[in-house]
Amino acid sequence: MSRSKQIIAGAAVILSSLSCLPAVAAESVTIGSVAMDIPVEMIKRFEPLTHYLSDKTGISVTFRPSANLASAVEDLGKNQTQISYLTPVAYVEAHEKYQAVPLVAPTINGKPDFTLVIVARNPSKIMTPMDLKGKRFAFGDEKALLQKAAVASMGLKSADFSKFAYLKHYDNIAKAVIAGDFDGGILKDTVADEFKNKGLKIIGTTPPLASYVFAVNKDTPKPIVDKLKVAFLSLKNKGADAAVLAAFDSSYDGFVAIEDKDYDQIRTLIAPFK
């Protein structure tokens, strides 16, 4: 074989071997969330957001729903998800157990806070939280200690109810109260607003509380964290991006950077219930 043919043959072997090598994977992130609704509804809420984050960062972002608050914390802590949307209590737990890092919090009217409210059927004779003594009451997740703290702040405790149950999702609570299965329940303010014209009324509320938060696993590479943070902070309730926020939560108008110390208020509130 001539020298030139040997070179060509050798090059062909090298190219053939290179083609068998696995492709280098692009950067990818899995985003998780506490369960605020059934999985199919959570996927609908997160799909526009994952597309937005992928487009803005160049990172492949996918969504993985969690069954409950506890599994959302475990998924983030064990790096099954690299970023997760958590309740304040879930974040506090994820920070304590796994050193999760707060990234951004959603804003309503420019402020990163929310309230928990007690609701009853409308119309009904129940007008104040005290009217629910001896009545049936619906909570969400059993590990959502802030709900119990909120109810206690309005003068009630679980022992005051003739019956109480944990219905997991806020939508379940709202529908159960409207249906008459329970006399009252605890809701996030934005969920209560959605059901105000469907047979619910607010009869008690907490002061403003530190918001839900997107937190990241402590080992998520800083360049990825920085890209995600910039993308979140760029998301505003205007233009083409408005649909992304509307799908996720129609009450949100953007995001702000958040720090761990912002959740000290939550730690104080839930301490008696841990």
Image (cartoon, rainbow, N blue to C red):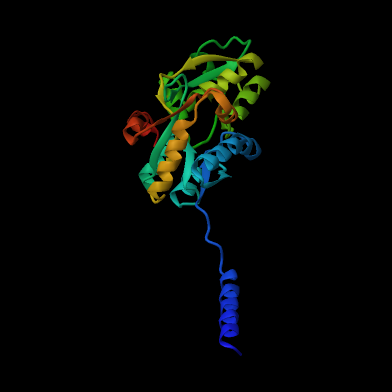
Which residue is at the far right? Answer: 179
Image-based side of 172 in relation to 253, left or right = right
- Residue 127 visible to an observer of this rendering: yes
Which residue is at the far bottom? Answer: 1
Residue 145 at what x, y percent from top left?
Answer: 44, 33
- The residue closer to the viewer here, 232 or 8, is 8
Residue 71 at what x, y percent from top left?
Answer: 51, 45
Image-based side of 153 in relation to 190, left or right = left
Quadrant of the frame with the N terminus = bottom right
Residue 244 at what x, y percent from top left?
Answer: 57, 31
Q: Is residue 17 above or below residue 247?
A: below
- Residue 185 visible to an observer of this rendering: no
Quadrant of the frame with the C terminus = top left
Residue 216 at what x, y percent from top left?
Answer: 43, 43
Q: How many marks?
A: 0
- The residue closer to the viewer here, 158 or 121, is 121
Q: Is residue 139 above or below residue 155?
A: below
Residue lying at 31% horizontally and 33% vertically, measured from the top left: 261
Instruction: Report which quarter residue 49 is drawn in.
Output: top right
